Every structure is written in structure tokens, then in C-alpha cells.
Amino acid sequence: MLTAQGDLLVNFFYWILEKGFRLARFLLHLFLTLIYQGRGKHVSPTRNELVLISATKLAQKIREGKIKCEDVIQAYIDRILEVEPVINATVQRRFSDALKEARDVDVLVASGKFTKEQLAEQKPLLGVPLSVKVFLTVKGLRSTASSKLFKDVKATEDAPTVAAMKSAGAIILATTNTPEMGLNLESNNKLYGRTYNPYDTSRTSGGSSGGESALISAGGSVIGLGNDLIGSIRIPSLFTGLFGHKPSRGMVSSEGCFPVPNSKVLNLLSTGPICRYAEDLVTTMSVLTARKEMRIKFGQSVNFADVKIFYMLSMDVPFAAPVQKDFQEAIKKVICYFQNTYQVIAKEKNIPLLKKSNLIAFHFLLSAAGNITHTLTSGKKNVNRVREFLKWLIGISDLTVPAVLTMNFGKSPLFYNKTNLVYYENLAKQLDEEFDTFLDEKSVFLFPTFPITAPYNNEALLYIPSSCYCNIFNTLGLPSTQCPLGLNNQGLPIGIQIISRRNNDPLTIALAVELEKAFGGWVMPGTIER
């Protein structure tokens, strides 16, 4: 990665380093292909129709008395028990409490105390199963950050977003797995083990919301809560064929996360929904923003003929992987749909500053983090990073490789130079202004969510620089909706992200709803043979 004031010698050094990095990634991929090829499994398709109904429609059927909430919750419990041996997505389950809450819902509906309209207004998610990423606190459940350092920590209160979903009637079934402290693009740790992709268990389900994405895609939950710092909602959603939304900065509370981020990191973090059905983005975002002073209206009719589409098919970022053809074709397919259906004119953009996405995003993040070890542990554990590195070298550290490396080398000159911070802050400002010049209330920007489909297990660490397609929008605070667009010829999900100007989240979600109608959205794992 080039420094702001780099001379020819430094540039040459980085050129050599990047070539070596790309070679290492190629060789690792080749090795893992030989190891895994043909050995991955997929979860079996569900036979219970209750598991194939959107959260929005489930809530409607429950409040209308057409289905019993207890039957819904039991169906999801059965599905979790069926798929969990294959994907290992859950951290802690609360099945008994969930069934009790479901029976209470059935009693409430039968009592006639509230009309269907009142329930729809006050409890739009009444009786709907919900899963929650373990980073978000759920009162009474373990809040471990998927690290042995915090294996005995229990949450004493709900995160604001968790409280909002519960208040809307959702019933929590389980919390889900992540990488240790969120420091990887695959969900693997020494406390709970590895989460696998439901389409192909030789592949990762992503990170850091990888337990959420795997469980929801496998049919073990219908909606979930995750959070996103460099793509941690969108990338796992892509890898597992789901819809995932990173809200505009400040639109949804990001508090209630453990370890507790400082205010500067919190400013880059977004909490948002992950789901199988696009209409559930409308419902969940309506719930999550219900207490805002100016309530944002989701789900309103959009005249797509008035929408302006801008796009980029790829970009050349040091250390990032090139964009696979499937993703470029997916963007073209979306453009053709809107051109043919609504006569929309699409314009390709060239934004040279995006090539510095990683340098901008990681300078913001690492500057905000301050003392990395202290931030990762919320100051609650006295961790000696050098000692942990030595312990890791001889195989006795309780921390994972990404945690050890981040604590010791996270602020390496390769990634961060404090003297260049102002330079990258100015670049971010320029980039923000450039997006603001062409994105208005009726405009969207189509962009790859990630350059490749789900990597093999143990491969994702070398793809962290490829998060450049997502991380820059955390820095800028723009909304982004990951939208699935079917499977490739290997049976792996592909998709794109839809971006717009700040606080224009309803438009990106409206496009996702439209694209689900056009292209089918989520595809049940196991229904198409690889």
C-alpha cells in the first residue's frame, strides 16, 4: 500500500510486497482447492413450509390467527437442530424460553385484547423468530466476543437494537458465531469453532456476522441482527445468498456492542438487518428507526423510471483481488433489467480516489482504535500482546491468529502512518464530495460487494484487503444494501451492493425488493446441484 509521501524506493518495495502477497494468495487457493475440491457438503432443503415464509408475512398470519406462533417457533427449533451439525452457527440457544414466549403470543392473539390493526402497528414482528450476532448484547445471555478472554461474561441489558426488535414482538432463538473480536472475514475461533457455509461446507460463511448469515440462509432463522465495520453484514450476506443492509451513519443505534467500542470506532460501525426476503428489510428497518425524531418511511412506492443508476464494475486496489466476471455480469444484468423495464439510463463512473479505499478506511479505523489491544478488550483484560505473540509461536495462545497479528502489527507502517492521517482525511472528504455531486434522492450506485464468491475455509485472512469494496462506505457513512442475484456455476451465491446518498436507505432497499421480484432473491441451499 502506497504511503502519501512515498519515494521511488518505497514504491518499489510495495510493488514487490504486493506481488508476493498475490502469489501467496494464489498458492494458498491452489492448495486449498486440492484439499477441499468436491468434499464440501450442503444443508438439506427444508420440508416445513413455515420456515419458508417471510418475517413480515409470518407476523401477519400470527396476528390474524391463521397460524400458531408456537408452531412457527417449534419449526425453527427443529430446523436449527437439523442444520447445526452441518454449519455450527449458534453460540447460545434459548429454545425453552422462546417456546414459552410463543405460547404467550398465542394467548394474546386469542384474547382479542388488541385488534389485528393494533397488533400490526404496535407489534409488527409479533411472534417472529430472531437470531442475534453474539457481539450485540442480549440480557442474560453470554456476551463473549467469541473469545476465551470473555467466555464467562453475561450481558446485563439488551442492546438498543435488540430491545427494539423484542419490543416489536420478535422472539430470540439464539445468538450466533463470529470470528474472535470480529478480526477476520470468516467466523472461526477457539471458543465455538468454525461456522460453515450452508451451500458448501468447504467454504466460509464470512465474517464477522458469519454465524448469522449461515443460520438464516440454512433456514434456522428468518431475520437477524448483525453489525458492520468493514463489510461485516454485507460480505457474509453475499457469501450465503442473503439480503443485508448497512444503514446510513447514525440512522440506527450501534450501541450495545461487546467489546465496547470507543465513540470514534462507534462512528464507523453500523448495526443492521440480515434476512432471506427483501420485504423484511423494510419491516426491520422500520422497527429499528421507529424512535428517530424524524421517522424514516420505508416501503413507499418508487417510480423506478425516475431513478438514476451509476455503476462501477471493478477497481484496481493494491492487495485486493480482481473482481470475478460473475459479479461484473451481475451488475450488467441489473442494468439491463432497469433499462428494459423502466427505460432507466445507466452511467458508468470512474472514481480514481476509490483506489485508495483501503488506505483511507484503515487510517480512519486504526486512528479511531487508539491502543488496539486496549480497544479490542475494552480495557477489561490485561493482555500482553508480545507475550501472546510468543505463546502463539509455540502454539499455546488462547487467541486466534488474526487477534494476535492485529494486536502486534495492526499499526504497522504497511497499514497506518499517523503523519499521513490528515492527508487521508482530506481524501475522504474529497471522495464524500464526489459522491455527493452525482448521488441525489433518486440516484443509486451499483458496485460489487466483494470481488469473489465465498473463499475456502482458512483462506479469508488473505482477502481482508478486498474488503475495500465495502469498508469505504463505512468511512463515508453511506447506506448500502447487499442484494443476492442467484448462484454461479459452482453453486455459490453472487450479488451486488446498492449504495445511495446518506439517509436515502429507503431507495436502496426499494431496489433490492424490485430485484428480488426480477431475479428470485435467496436460493435455498441444496436445491441446485453443483
Image: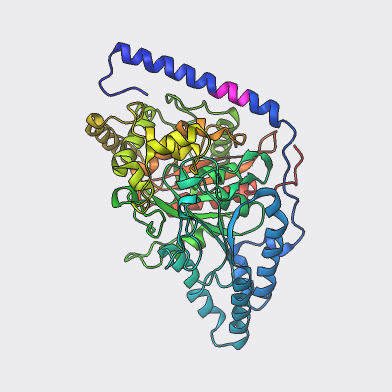
From the viewer's perspective, tell me whether residue 254 is left or right of residue 140.
left
Q: Nearer the viewer, residue 426 or 303?
A: 426
* Numbered label tally: 0
Q: Is residue 446 visible?
A: no
User: Is 28 inside the magenta-drawn segment?
Assistant: yes
Image point (67%, 74%), residue name:
70
Q: Residue at x 55, y 31 (%)?
A: 328
Could you say which quadrant of the image residue 423 lies in? Answer: top left
The reply, left or right, for residue 87 in relation to residue 16 is right
- Mark yes or no: residue 19 visible: yes
Question: Is 290 positioned to the left or the right of 98 in the image?
Answer: left
Q: Position of residue 231 (x, y in %)?
A: 46, 43
Could you say where residue 163 lies in the image, as x and y percent from the top left?
45, 68
Q: Quadrant of the C terminus?
A: top right
The N terminus lies in quadrant: top left
Stretch in magenta: 25-30
- As displayed, is residue 2 above or below residue 375? above
Residue 528: image location, x then y, percent: 75, 43
Q: Is residue 153 above or below residue 24?
A: below
Image spot of residue 7 (x, y percent) = 27, 14
| Of the pair 359 and 141, the residue shown nearer to us | 141
Magenta stretch, main secondary structure class:
helix
Left or right position of 253 against 133: left
Q: Front-most of 198 and 311?
A: 198
Instruction: Determine the image quadrant of residue 172.
Output: bottom right
